[in-house]
Amino acid sequence: MLAGEIQLKMTSRSRYFRFLIGTVLANFIPFIIKRKSIYSRLSFTKDIKTLLEGKEIMFHCHNEEISNTIFYTGFFGDYEGQTIKMWHQISKNLELHTALDIGAYSGFFSIVAASANPTMEIHAFEPNPITFKILKKNLDLNNFENVKISNFGLSSKNGHEKFFNFGDTFNPGMTSVNHRFVDSNFIQASFEIRDILDLRKKLYKKIDLIKLDIERAELPLLQHAKSIIYEDKPIIFCEVLDAEMYDSFQNFFQEMEYEYVQIDDEKKQYFFTSKMINREIIGRNWIMYPRGLKEDLLSIFRG
């Protein structure tokens, strides 16, 4: 047996052993396993099942933080749990027909939306071919018929675009923006992109809900898609990583009469606000919504 095969076999065994330990602790000492200092050491690679509001959900744990955290703490747990819960509540309780999951990664937001609202049509976009395989696997495991996946990114043009922080791993920080946090240890790669305006024309449907997590490329895409926001007035879940960008986001949304929900995933709190400017950074996720929906959202979140 070759040395590489021996190493792979040993790694596979150690991951399965970590899964067994984690499962035993989860069943018999659950308060211990929910400590991040414990479960972060027990990652593994395996298809698993969990419950989401009583519904059985399958997904592939692939020895990385996001799937590992959801396995041990649930969909509304330590990994952006408050954001995912609010995404689920909106998907379930509002009359929504079409959603875009832009920067879908391994598909957890699409899975949650599909489970919450089987009649909503969800389009998930992920340009990273390595991550796309996990996205496809997670959707196949659940046989969701209302999710369509695409192995390209959405941008301001059609063609290919250079992405940074790629590497050969499931790095969630892959980005088309060469920002100050780009890691020189990761390689660059060119992936297919398509114009979001062309996509909207082909869909020929009003877009009701958008999740936008594309590592500091969110605002340029929103600016390019301004006509969509004007016409469709979608609810937008958006990652905003830098507080110095709050004023730029507010300036963009202000004329369209949008307001905001700032989410604190660590403390599982949220705050309705009419302004982003001068807000203290308490997390990376925001909801941007048309002002007229405020009472509906308040009722959903408090209910």
Image (cartoon, helix red, strand yellow):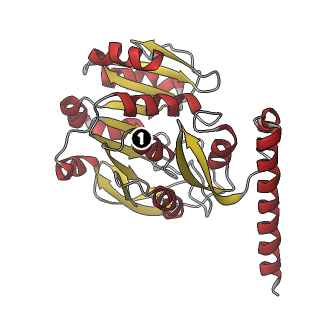
Instruction: Give me the residue at 22% from left, 47% from top.
Output: 200
The quarter of the picture where the C terminus appears is top left
Please indicate whether residue 84 sits to the left or right of residue 50 in the image.
left
Question: On the picture, is 260 further left or further right than 205?
Answer: right
Q: For the N terminus, give its image quadrant.
A: bottom right
Q: 197 or 234, which is in the foreground?
A: 234
- Residue found 51% across the figure and 64% down from its top: 133
Q: Position of residue 102 (x, y in %)?
A: 40, 46
Residue most extreme to the bottom: 1
- With respect to residue 189, does 35 lie above or below? above
Looking at the image, which is closer to me, 217 or 234? 234
Residue 95, x across and y down, in percent: 28, 31
Which amino acid type is marked by label 1? Ala
Residue sitting at 30 percent across and 48 percent down? 156
Give the x, y percent position of residue 55.
51, 43
- Direction from residue 105 to residue 29 in the image, left or right: right
Question: Considering depth in this image, is 69 or 132 the residue closer to the camera?
Answer: 69
**Quarter of the image where one finds residue 37:** top right
Give the quadrant of residue 280: top right
Q: Residues within 10 Å of mark 1 (few under 14, many from 20)?
A: many
Query: Height in image: 240 above or below 277?
Result: below
Find numbered disc 1 in the image and state the secondary structure of the residue it sits on. helix
The residue under label 1 is 113
Query: Residue 76 falls in which quadrant of the image?
Result: top right
Above or below, comparing residue 270 to residue 207 in the picture: above
Q: Is residue 236 above or below residue 172?
A: above
Taking the spot 56% from the left edge, 58% from the top edge, the residue there is 166
